[in-house]
Amino acid sequence: MAEQFKDQTIIITGATKGIGRAMAAVFGANGANILATGRTEDELDSICREVERAGAQAVPLVADLALADSPARITQQALDSFGRIDVLINNAAIIHDSASLVEFDAELWQRVLYVNLVAPALLTKAVLPHMIERRHGKVINIASIGGRRGGSGRSAYRAAKAGLINLTESVAAEVKQYGIDVNCICPGATDTEGFRSAFDHKGRQQDAKLMESREIAELALFLASRQASAITGTAIDAFGATNPIFQSESHKGKI
């Protein structure tokens, strides 16, 4: 699969940690050029060095998706650096502490909705004209299993991720005629710094049910590949052994 990504340009938002960092490493190892965005220069430089050690090119861009000019800056930087945009991965997100809607700070609620839903929509809007012109492109949104259904606490995060799933389906319908595929990954509990912080979790060694970031990255690699050309407008749940169907004790027999 590596050969097909050679010279392709992949934009990855939130590329400094967790799933985003894993995706930058996996795509870089497969020969893709990476535009990595994040808010911390040192961490961006670190992942870019990792990509370059694998033999690919990587450009860091400090960008806060809460700022209105970020989509245009990111798009222009990718074109200036590599001359093309093949894949956009909307990964950056805010994971907030659990709080009821009554307790939730209104300003934070709006910021979460903006970064987790509005910003991906605006960045996709900025990138699509270049993909439409070439009649080629892939957009991969990283949502969450939390966007599949409601639950107590984290209503802003859940609502934004639900919106991202619907955005995926809507945009896919709009651009399929141009040869552009738009899909969504809905990870479950994944062993990332953000998950451990938000849920006060000790990590994969303490719970083998957690997904690894690289598992999500490999799924993104497949969706970005030619082998996935028949898949668009799809939200794929990826939550391994945390799937509720594996928690049932009703079946005690052996297979």
Image (cartoon, rainbow, N blue to C red):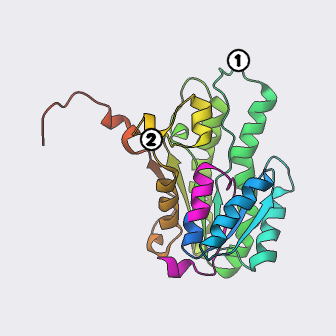
Please give the residue where the numbered disc 1 appears in the rendered image: 102
Which residue is farthest top? Answer: 102
User: Is disc 2 placed on a helix, strand or loop?
Assistant: loop
Which residue is farthest left? Answer: 254
At x 67%, y 81%, the residue is 134
The picture places residue 195, in percent across and down from the top left corner, at 58, 37
The picture places residue 230, in percent across and down from the top left corner, at 45, 70
Please name whichever residue, 1 or 144, is drawn nearer the observer in this view of the structure. Answer: 1
At x 66%, y 22%, the residue is 99
Q: Quadrant of the rendered structure where residue 208 is?
A: top left
For the C terminus, the image quarter is: top left
Part of the protein shown in magenta:
1-25
User: Neighbour class for label 2 at 10 Å: few (<14), some, many (≥20)?
Assistant: some
Number of the label disc, if any, that sits on residue 210: 2
The picture places residue 211, in percent across and down from the top left corner, at 45, 46
Q: Quadrant of the rendered structure where residue 130 is?
A: bottom right
User: Position of 45 compared to 196: left or right?
Assistant: right
The picture places residue 246, in percent across and down from the top left corner, at 31, 37
**Does the magenta run of residues contain 17?**
yes
